[in-house]
Image (tube, rainbow, N blue to C red):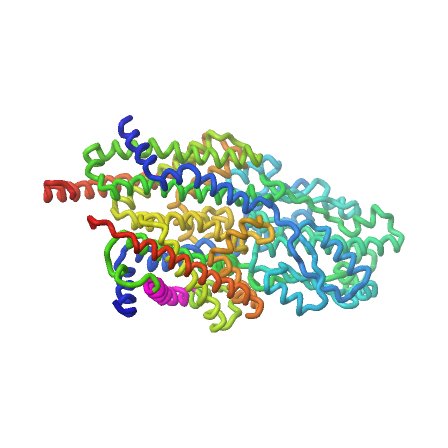
Amino acid sequence: MTSLIRRELKALWNDPWQFALVTYIPILGIISLWWLFSAGMPRQLPVAIVDHDQSQLSRMLARRIQASPAAKPIGYQDIASAKRAMTQGEVYALVVLPYRLKRDLLTGHSPTIEIRYNSQFLLVGKLLSSQIQLSLADGLLHVASKKQLALGVPKAQAEINLRPVTSQTTALYNSNSNYIGFLVPPVLLALGQLLAMLVFANSLNRELRLNTMSEWFSLGTRRVLFAKMLVYTPLIVLQGRFILAVLYQFLNLPLAGGFGLLLVAQVAMLLAVWLIVLVIFFLLQDCARVISFCTALFAPAFPFMGITFPTLDMPMLAQLWRKLMPSSHYIDTHVGVVSYGQGWDTLADQLINYWGFLFLVPVIVFLAKRVKRAHLAEQSHSPEGAK
Amino acid sequence: MTFWQFLLADLRAIVTDKAIAITLFGGVLFYSVLYPLPYLNQVPTEQMLVVIDHDGSSLSRRLIRHADASPKITVTGRVSTIETAQSWIESGRANGLLVIPHGFRKDLMLGRGSTLSYGGDANYFLIYSAVVEGLVSVGLDAGKYVQLVGLLAHGENAKAAERSLNAVKLNSVPAFNPSLGYTPYVVPGVLLLVLHQTLLIGTGILGAGQWQNQGYWRRVSPLMLISGRICVFFLIYTLFTSLYVGHCYYWYGVSVQATLWQVALFLLPFLLSTAVTGIAFSCLFTRRDLPTQVLLLISMPILFVSGFVWPLELIPDPLIWISTIIPAVPAIIGMLQLNQMGASWASIMPLWLHLWGLFALFFMLALYGVNKRLKREPNSEL
């Protein structure tokens, strides 16, 4: 076995791309994706303000929006130019403070403040809409409280009269709604799964490319496969551990559970990935085609994880496809460990969910035997060897 | 070899190469179904809420009924402690919790004010925002109800009372994607990226497999090879693009604002520059399994730097600078502005010129690369 492992390590050393895939490419990928989201929270997003009233009140409301961390108000003179800025993506929302806003408010007519937000950029748009409404509502409350005070209501009572029901909202498990904690782990997981798939597929493809399939079969089909798994599983888990170290030790994101559980879950995920890659490899038996097919299969893993869009709201077919992706099984464990601090018993239940992948084993055995037979037949036809 | 013969030979090489065919024909069709699949229900609705009602009054029951009536929330159960509610969330039986404090109704009726607590599982932002939006509107409603009862009790007339509660109306309306749906948000960008990536992979595999071998590509000049190949891929991708931008956008309910000719005019340099980028890119490889791998690894970063998932204002500048040499980035930004947000042609003109600039740049690089590749003698044994 040690000689087989040495064979794999030598192959890894002699293939610069494969070597890159297990060393610096993951590091580059992790750093650049983290860097991309490093702002963490959407802040200072440009918002167009068209102030037709130019009163003390309208300026106060504009200042309220400025005070909100999410928005950076930019004044526009007319609606047309504000609209143009919005269609060009220069501002993400548009607030129109109407003419006679103050007067209408004081005389008991109810004026309307128009807000338009860019929902083509859903995330930014929704956030801005709620933040702007909060800031404006707060500003208006300030005006209303003056009215109450003028009527002779004591200050403490006035505040309660205006807002009898206050609310306290808690974002559980990610208390400041940080996008790094929300988006970066699944993105890196998707990247990690792609890397794992590529590394394993390359290691199998190498036998095809260098015409060493017969050597493989003579060394023992299963033994070489185990050697490959023994080499690459720890290497990829090491990458996974590095990702976890960056997220939960270097960036100090909250982690409720332990690393051990996550690493065990990663091993299970990798075994499932290996099985899928093996099926495709023995089925197609062509380097470029194996890679193309695996790519087609694994590239869209991210939307199916159910982090950005909830799993239960996906159509049935999407939920089924989700079950085929090892990463979606892993992400459930990941969230469970990181946020809920789940224990080994829950992990055991989740690992049992991988049972479907075991059906791939007989398929692989069957396909591998077919490939082996074909190779032996080819060799007996040309006794001098492949060339 | 004439230009036409080269076109035919190249077309045949693409269609008969299974690795390219899987990516081009299989991939493009497969992804047009698979990528939007999770989002077909558009908005998350009926998120599961668990209620901790310490009050047990008529008003708290009314509040729970209203929460249940909200389309975003369904009340799945009531428990007595926050710990139990938390274990419900952790076991996936609930997504959020609502705590109604003891003496809620009494305090409100006595004019003392009361605080409702909401919580949502922020591991899933969409679930969290659905729960919170649903509950905030329910809570505001309860507050208004109490205020209205108070005002009416003081002898105010019902209409005036309502008006004084809604002194200013805030009319917040989503623009460009009026349903706030998820497919109109994701599909336009992602489908363009799929076109871009598969086109690069196709040209990449084709080139990588040819440089070291003898064949029809050695019988033409580099200039003819590049322009011929651009023509062939452009032809194939005109069909794919029509399918995506014409049919899929319509099918997935993407809002479409530009005219056909504007879209065609904008996508022309996109396809041309992507095709020539692919040819330049293919000169870097001689192994047919490598181009796909490189492109696979950079697809997610490209998607994120094109600015519709994460705002461009927040992306570090160096990443933005690097991203400007990728044709997909100006194309996605420009198409979103032109076709989804209804920008005028004049305002996206710089992006259009940017794409032509990339075309020129990569054409030079492709010319240099192909020249170099074809000068080297093919492998003797093949």
B90 lies above or below B172: above
Which residue is depicted at the point 69% across and 64% down? A114
Pinpoint residue B119: horizontal percent, then vertical percent. Answer: 62, 43
- Residue closest to the eye, A109 or B4: B4
Q: Is residue B99 magenta?
A: no
Whole-percent x, y for residue B41 in the image: 48, 57
Q: Position of residue A294 (x, y in %)?
A: 34, 48
Quadrant in which the N terminus of chain B is drawn? bottom left
Label the magenta part by its dominant secondary structure: helix
Q: Quadrant of residue B236?
A: bottom left
Tally of numbered tags: 0
The foreground one among B356 and B274 is B356
Where is residue B194, by image quadrant? bottom left
Residue A51, x across and y down, in percent: 74, 64
Left or right, A332 with respect to A383, comes to right
The residue lying at 59 percent from left, 63 percent from top is: A88
Q: Is residue B183 left or right of residue A358?
A: right
As drawn, A40 above or below A85: above
Could one spot residue A83 in this view of the protein? yes
**Magenta-tinted stretch:** B224-244
**Residue B75, can we see it?**
no
In this view, the residue farthest toward the top is A2
Is residue B227 toward the left or the right of residue B360 in the image?
left
